[in-house]
Image (cartoon, rainbow, N blue to C red):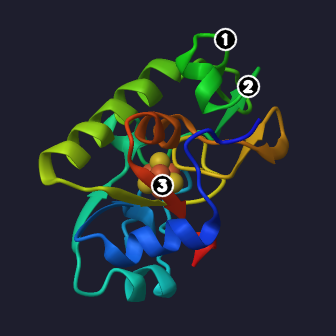
Amino acid sequence: MTDPGSSAREDRVAALREARVVLVSACLLGEACRFDGRSKRSEPVMAALEGKEVVPMCPEVGGGLPIPRPPVELSDGTGVDVWAGRARALEREAGVDRTEAFLRGARMALEAARKFGATVALLKEKSPSCGSQHVYEAGKLRSGEGITAALLRAEGITVLSDEDL
Ligand code: SF4
């Protein structure tokens, strides 16, 4: 699936350069909020955010999921399909449906972006929430976006990933 709200990489990076307020995946900032209890602190991300107002957000924790938590993958589609009601977010091993928590967290991320005036979101690639170019569906990496990235793009926020930097 193509990303309807995405632009070329250089356009996304230019938007980040010009943004004053940026919504950022909290794990990229060093917060240990990933499913495995670790962070994914990124020095290129930290450097790109220098001088900007940063709004940290972990949609999965915001949606009520614990740290650590079982890994989740998208099933029957990507984030866009989840919002359309034809795909789900399921725990990889047990198949427990976590879609509602993911939707809740995505809405919280959008609210935070609006509240603080973030026009750009810099999110962790390949996450079922934050992925913006690639996500895992049923064990395979495919093109597409996660549940939070899809909502932010649909609402006009430029989304790029750590892998764009
Ligand atoms: S990728 Fe997104 S949902 Fe996953 S830990 Fe990082 S901020 Fe949270």
Asked if residue 38 shows in the view, the reply is: yes
Which residue is tagged 3?
159
* Tag 2: amino acid: Gly
Circle 2: element type: loop
Please rate how many residues cluster around mark 3, counting C-alpha atoms within 10 Å: few if below 14, some from 14 to 19, many from 20: many
Where residue 145 appears, as percent x and y from the top left, is 63, 42
Estimate the spatial distance between the alpha carbons at disc 3 and disc 2, rounded to whole Å.
19 Å
| Placement of 75 over or under 121, stated as above or below | above
* Tag 3: amino acid: Val
Res. 63 mark? none
Report the side of 91 relative to 109 (left or right): right
Q: Nearer the viewer, residue 131 or 69?
A: 131
Circle 1: element type: loop
Rendered image quadrant of residue 45: bottom left
Estimate the spatial distance between the alpha carbons at disc 1 and disc 3, rounded to whole Å.
23 Å
Rendered image quadrant of residue 144: top right
Please name the residue shown 58% across and 50% down the image.
6
Look at the numbered discs 3 and 2 and tell me whether their residues touch, using CB distance below 8 Å.
no
Which residue is tagged 2?
77
Which residue is tagged 1?
86
Asked if residue 34 shows in the view, the reply is: no
Q: How many marks?
A: 3
Work out which residue is located at the far left of the displayed protein and give it: 115
Q: Nearer the viewer, mark 3 or mark 2?
A: 3
Which of the two discs, 1 and 3, labels the residue nearer the N terminus? 1
Which of the two discs, 1 and 2, labels the residue nearer the N terminus? 2
Report the side of 39 relative to 24 (left or right): right
Please rate how many residues cluster around mark 1, counting C-alpha atoms within 10 Å: few if below 14, some from 14 to 19, many from 20: few
Estimate the spatial distance between the alpha carbons at disc 1 and disc 2, rounded to whole Å.
7 Å
* Tag 1: amino acid: Arg
